[in-house]
Image (spheres, helix red, strand yellow):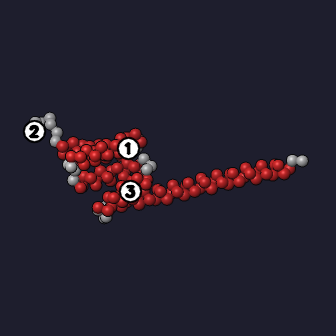
């Protein structure tokens, strides 16, 4: 192999590094690009049967990070569950899963609060309308 050529292993490592950086970016477009790269890499490696189980796990975990950072919490949790089926003691995956679940609960409480606020506001409007109709001669 000449000096300028890259191997499949080098390509996979480069894709993993770039994907890691993208899914950890503060820019939503970068995070999505990282997820897309990981999906494409997974499809390509499955077709060629080139990735090890460890590589597949790392790609799945990085996709879970990306989905978490983009707000797709249920997708992130599903991927983490899959990671933990294969390696139940994976500390990073366990920590991220707890973070994802905490966020799902927090968002649920926020949703309930918004709904309750809307109901209270609607009741207030109805009460004002009813009392204004009662005062008219």
**Residue pointed to by mark 1:** 31
Mark 3 near mark 2, Cβ–Cβ under 8 Å?
Answer: no
- State whether residue 24 is above or below residue 109: above
Residue 119 in the image: x percent, y percent? 66, 54
**Residue positioned most to the front:** 47
Measuring 42% from the left and 47% from the top, which residue is drawn there? 70
Measuring 77% from the left and 49% from the top, which residue is drawn there? 129
Residue 107 in the image: x percent, y percent? 51, 55
Residue 51 in the image: x percent, y percent? 22, 50
**Residue positioned most to the right:** 137
Q: Residues within 10 Å of mark 2 (few under 14, many from 20)?
A: few
N-terminal of the pair, mark 2 or mark 1, is 2
Q: How much space separates mark 2 and mark 1, taking CA atoms?
A: 34 Å
**Residue positioned most to the bottom:** 89
Q: Residues within 10 Å of mark 3 (few under 14, many from 20)?
A: few
In what element is the residue under mark 2?
loop
Measuring 38% from the left and 56% from the top, which residue is drawn there? 78
Residue 9 in the image: x percent, y percent? 18, 45
Mark 1 near mark 3, Cβ–Cβ under 8 Å?
Answer: no
Q: How much space separates mark 1 and mark 3, taking CA atoms?
A: 18 Å
Quarter of the N terminus within the rendering: top left
Q: How much space separates mark 3 and mark 2, taking CA atoms?
A: 41 Å
In what element is the residue under mark 1?
helix
Whether residue 85 is visible to the viewer of this picture, yes or no, is yes
**Residue pointed to by mark 3:** 78
Residue 134 shown left or right of residue 29 in the figure: right
**Residue pointed to by mark 2:** 1
Foreground label between 1 and 3: 3
Residue 111 shown left or right of residue 2 in the figure: right
N-terminal of the pair, mark 1 or mark 3, is 1
């Amino acid at each position: 192999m000449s000096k300028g050529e890259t191997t499949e292993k080098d390509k996979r490592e480069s894709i993993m590094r770039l994907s890691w950086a993208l899914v950890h970016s503060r820019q939503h477009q970068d995070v999505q690009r990282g997820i897309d790269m990981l999906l494409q890499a997974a499809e390509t490696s499955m077709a060629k049967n080139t990735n090890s189980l460890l590589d597949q796990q790392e790609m799945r975990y990085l996709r879970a990070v990306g989905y978490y950072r983009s707000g797709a919490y249920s997708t992130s949790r599903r991927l983490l569950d899959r990671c933990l089926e294969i390696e139940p003691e994976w500390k990073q995956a366990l920590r991220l899963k707890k973070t994802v679940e905490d966020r799902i609960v927090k968002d649920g409480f926020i949703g309930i609060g918004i709904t309750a606020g809307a109901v209270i506001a609607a009741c207030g409007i109805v009460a004002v309308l009813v009392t204004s109709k009662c005062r008219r001669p």
